Each structure stands twice: as structure tokens, then as C-alpha cells.
Amino acid sequence: MLARPGGGSPWELLSGRVFRALWVAALASSMGSWIEGVAVMWKMAELTDSPLLVALVQTAGSLAIVTLAVPGGAISDLWPRRAILAVTQGWAVATALALALSAALGLLDPAVIIVLTFSLGLATTLGWPAWQVTLPEVALPTQMPAAVALNSAQWNIAQLLAPALTGVVLAVAGSSAALGLSALGFAGFFGAALLWRPARVRPRGGLVHVHVAGRVALRYARRSGALRALLVRTALFALPASAMLALLPLVARRLLHEGSSGYGLLLSLIGAGALLGVTLLPRLAPLGSKVLLWAGMLLLAVTLVVVAVARSTWIVWPDLFVAGTVWLVVPTTLVVAVQRVTPPRIRSRGLGMYLAVYQGAFAIGSTTAGLVADRVGVPLTFFAAALALVLGALVAARTPLPGVEGTGGAGLGR
């Protein structure tokens, strides 16, 4: 059953039974992702004082996504999405269990963390394009922006709840218990994928066809000025923005002198801000995608500067809440725009290219942030990232978005 036509609130989509079931399953998987991410990032911060090694955890996940993003989009366009989601979530369950077992046996060293984080990133990559296309298709065509925003919301609800929960579990029961809990989250979506009964779709190609399909998508990106413009803006945002998440464990430990529960709370505040972004996005839509993108970059630059200079949690907490709102508005605007300018037959591949650029920029930005922080410290690294965001915002404000401006919808517009 499709979601019912609603008014202005994205939350009305949850009145649809199929949409609601898939959304709750995705929430369970997102909880698993955040629990795993917080646990391994904090464990790495405990194992080493090197900002580079801490940042490489995020880099490993991002590089895995870059490796398979475009092929993952091609697979989603050619093969049944139910099978893709079941396989990738089963893979995620196995990886999380391997992390939990390694922690229980005392084998969770930096190398194991990076390798298994890369493995989980591969599973995420293959499933992400299929999921991004599936949820909007369960809704009505006019509800695509709301469906994308609500999909982002479940991720950020998980970010609100999971980090604080993980911090407590880490303090009370250790990393093995936390990582076992993450496996349960992935198992929830795995079970839902097995039970879901969409319309039957016959596979349209094998591995050779996937390769050809990927080439078609890359050729389209080279010829589409609208898609190129969106991918450039994606890189301009993700490169410097990655510094905040890559170095946040060190902000908690070194600048704010917090433990694992304090680190979890910082991430939860970002998630809370993102939930506000879900509510604000329909009201901000009339501003247009161009304004939302460059304004979001400028606002995130301000939040980075505040984190760099503040030494009080009472200042950092509301600042990260604002940062979370930006983290919802900017990527959602980009995802909706990419889907609007990409033909339906290659839409998953278009999202795959977006994901490759986003995560590639995240990988490069995280590694760079770690290297810079090794030499000049975390505060100066945040200042440099803020400056890069300001310069990127200026570029975004002065260049057009051909084929995107004037199309209407959330995150789009003039």
C-alpha cells in the first residue's frame, strides 16, 4: 500500500503500512550503524593518541563506499532490490559479529578496526542506492522530497538515540557488548528484507551488464551540466565538513575532557539538530537549492569555529545541534536534486555517483584533517576546514545550477 497523500508534514507518510514497515526496519539498521561507528571510533581513540589513526576509521568506511558506489547503483538498476537489501544487511550482520568477537577475544586492534570498517562500508555501499530509490517509490511521486527527508530523519533519529546508548553500554559492558548490539540492529533490517514482498522484477543483466551500465552512468554525468554542478557542490561541502565527524572523539577527549558517554551525547545532539531539519526543510524549500547549499556551508563553517574556540560543553552542545540541522538540509537537498535531474532508468546509478563523490570527498577530507591535526592540533584544523567551507560557499553562490533551479520541490526551486 502506498503512503497516503498528506499535507505539509513529511511524518504523514508513516500512515502507509508498507512505508512504515520499511522505515522502521531502516531505523533498526541505522541504529546498528551508529552503535558500531561510535564503538569503533571511541575504541580507536582509546588505543592511540594519533589523530590520523582516529580519522582513518572514517576514511576506511568512506573508501569502501567509493570503491563500489557506481557499481552498486548499476546493480540496483538491474537486479531485484529486495535481494540486494537482504544480502547487504546479512553482510553487515556478519561484519558486526566479527567486530564483537574480536573485541571479546582482545583482538580489536587498529588494523582489525580499519579492515572490518572497510568491510561494513562495502555492504553499506551495495545496499544504499537500492534503498534510496526504494523508499521514495513506496510513496507517491509528489511525496519524493518528503520521503527523502523522512529517510534522512530515521538516520538522524538513530544518531540521536544510538550514540548516547552506546556511550552507556561502553562504560558499563565494554566494546564487545556494544558491537553485539549493533549486529542486532542490522539483523532487524535483514529480517524485514526477507519478509518484504514487492512486485517481482526479473534481473536485467549479469556482471558484464553492470560494467556497461556503470559506463553509461559515467557518460551521462560527463554530458549533464546539472549533475556535474551538483557533484561539484557535493565535494565542496563534504571535503571540509568531514573534519568535524573525523575528529569529534578527540574534541570530546582532549578539548572537553569527556568520556565515552560524553562523546555519545555530542553525536546525539547532532542527530537532534537533524530532526529539526526534517521539520524545517519544507518551509525552507522556497529559498531554492542554490541558497540552501551555500547558506548551509556558511553556517557549518561558523559551527566549526565555535567548536575550535569553545572549552565548555554548554557552548558546544547548542552549536552541534545547529550543525546537525545543516547535516540534514544540505545532503537532503543534494539527494533530491540528483534524483530530479537523473532519468529514471539510471537513477540508482546517479545516486551511486553522488555517493561516490560524497564519500570520496569524506575520505580525503578525513585523512587530511587527521594529518593536519597531527601537526597543528584540532582547533587549527577546524579553523582551516571552516575557511574551506566559506570559499566553497562563495563558489556555489556564484555558479548556476542548470536544470535544477526552477524545478520546484523540497531543496530545489529557483
Image (spheres, helix red, strand yellow):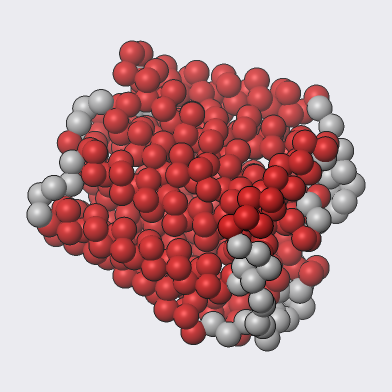
Q: Quadrant of the C terminus?
A: top right
Q: Quadrant of residue 44?
A: top left
Provide residue 141's location: percent of width, then percent of height: 79, 69
Provide residue 191's location: percent of width, then percent of height: 42, 78
Provide residue 65's location: percent of width, then percent of height: 50, 46
* Residue found 52% across the figure and 42% down from its top: 66
Residue 406 or residue 210, whichever sits in front: 210
Q: Is residue 196 visible?
A: yes
* Residue found 38% across the figure and 63% down from its top: 91
Q: Quick check: 184 left or right of 228?
A: left
Q: Quadrant of residue 15?
A: bottom right
Task: Tell me how many marks there are.
Answer: 0
* Residue found 43% across the figure and 50% down from its top: 121
Above or below for 289 versus 26: above
Q: Quadrant of the N terminus?
A: bottom right
Above or below for 188 versus 50: below
Q: Outermost residue toward the right?
A: 406
Q: Outermost residue toward the top?
A: 375
Q: Is residue 316 visible?
A: no
Provide residue 371's location: percent of width, then percent of height: 37, 20
Above or below for 232 versus 91: above
